[in-house]
């Protein structure tokens, strides 16, 4: 005889871990930033969550939060589960475009990253260099990684279905991917990528194994982000580049939407950095020449759903800023003022 259990309304207390201090700088000084957060987007994780703002480094973090053994339950309907191997990748569609815009873009990529994309005209490479908005989007897509030399290896941590790995492989990199979701890892393998189904905390590579490491919206999912950054520094060969993208806890969107800001994504997003706190974390992990870049890359994926969440909550009618600000306005602001960007786009050199 089978029986059905009612869905959980709270995350089991035995599966929670309590911090009491900031996982970025270890300060115990903090204030509540948002309380009673729920999984309103993927709708598979029970419970209510509290995000604190560290009074020292200004990062945000959940406390308490799901422990390492139970966090997987919050990812049952996560985006990496979608199998789109039969659809053209974003990069393939990008290169398939034949227009003046694509010629200007390819000209910039060829001159900056040593590629041989077409159509292109070397004399036009300066155009993208003069337009911050266009240049930032392309540099972000390239992971800020230079043209590879023979034998250079690139690691992507949290590679999802492997589209970025496939793109970088086509440019000459020897690539390795790490993906904790077994379904997404299998999708990436069907693309022909070398992808290992491992948890980030279980990773271990010999020192100086890679010449580039990329993490695209991954660090916010890590229980111990400082340890991850320290390991990345150890795994990189001298001069290798770590590139990171992650939600910006001090973004214009976080100020406008508050508890309806999509990138809060409790309880999967455990730690949210500011530009300043992530820069300091990279330096403390041993990286130098740390650079941040203005980017409007995440505006489209953040503002519209945040606005819808705000409408659903009933707060949109009273939020004048939300009603006035559109994606294009915020994208333009982000291109010139990195501190307002929806995401932090940052690199460090080992």
Image (cartoon, rainbow, N blue to C red):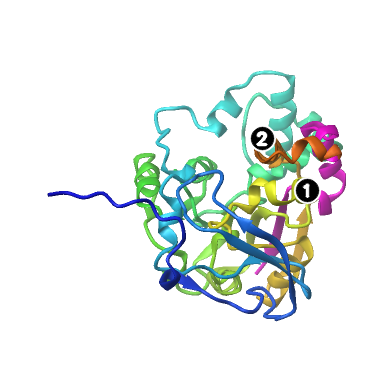
Secondary structure under the numbered disc 2 in the rendered image: helix
Q: Earlier in the sequence, mark 1 or mark 2?
A: 2
Are dots 1 and 2 in contact, CB under 8 Å? Answer: no
Q: Position of residue 181 (x, y in %)?
A: 40, 52
- Specify whether 276 is left or right of 208: right
Q: Name the quadrant containing residue 221.
A: bottom right
Residue 341's tag is 1
Identity of the residue drawn at 71% across and 57% down: 346
Say if the magenta span includes residue 73. Answer: no
Q: Position of residue 334 (x, y in %)?
A: 82, 44
Residue 308's tag is 2
Name the outermost residue toward the left: 1
Identity of the residue drawn at 30% across and 52% down: 5
Secondary structure under the numbered disc 1 in the rendered image: loop
Q: Nearer the viewer, residue 4 or 51?
A: 4
Relative to 96, is 47 above or below? below
Q: Nearer the viewer, mark 1 or mark 2?
A: 2
Residue 141 in view, yes or no:
yes
- Specify whether 250 is left or right of 336: left
Say if the magenta span includes residue 339. Answer: yes
Quote the CA–CA distance across marks 1 and 2. Answer: 20 Å
Stretch of the chain drawn in magenta: 321-350
């Amino acid at each position: 005889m089978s029986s059905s259990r009612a869905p959980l309304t709270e995350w089991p207390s035995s599966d929670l871990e309590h911090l009491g201090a900031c996982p970025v700088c270890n300060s115990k000084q903090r204030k509540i930033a948002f309380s009673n957060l729920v999984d309103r987007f993927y709708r598979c994780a029970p419970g209510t969550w509290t995000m604190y703002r560290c009074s020292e480094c200004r990062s945000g973090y959940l406390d308490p939060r799901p422990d390492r053994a139970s966090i997987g339950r919050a990812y049952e309907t996560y985006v990496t589960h979608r199998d789109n191997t039969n659809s053209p990748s974003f990069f393939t569609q990008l290169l398939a475009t034949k227009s003046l815009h694509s010629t200007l873009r390819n000209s910039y990529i060829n001159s900056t990253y040593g590629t041989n994309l077409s159509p292109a005209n070397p004399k036009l490479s300066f155009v993208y260099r003069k337009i911050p908005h266009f240049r930032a989007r392309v540099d972000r897509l390239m992971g800020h990684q230079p043209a590879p030399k023979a034998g250079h290896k690139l690691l992507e941590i949290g590679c999802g279905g492997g589209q970025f790995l496939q793109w970088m492989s086509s440019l000459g990199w020897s690539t390795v991917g790490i993906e904790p979701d077994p379904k997404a890892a299998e999708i990436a393998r069907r693309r022909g990528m070398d992808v290992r189904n491992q948890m980030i905390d279980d990773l271990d590579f010999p020192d100086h194994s890679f010449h580039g490491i990329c993490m695209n919206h991954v660090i916010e999912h890590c229980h111990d982000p400082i340890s991850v950054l320290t390991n990345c520094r150890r795994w990189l060969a001298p001069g290798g580049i770590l590139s990171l993208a992650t939600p910006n806890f001090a973004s214009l969107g976080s100020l406008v939407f508050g508890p309806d800001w999509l990138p809060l994504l409790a309880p999967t997003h455990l730690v949210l950095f500011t530009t300043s706190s992530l820069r300091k974390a990279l330096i403390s992990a041993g990286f130098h020449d740390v650079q941040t870049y203005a980017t409007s890359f995440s505006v489209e994926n953040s503002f519209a759903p945040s606005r819808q969440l705000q409408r659903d909550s009933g707060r949109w009618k009273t939020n004048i800023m939300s009603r006035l600000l559109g994606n294009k306005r915020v994208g333009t602001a982000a291109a010139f003022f990195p501190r307002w960007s929806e995401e932090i786009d940052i690199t460090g050199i080992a």
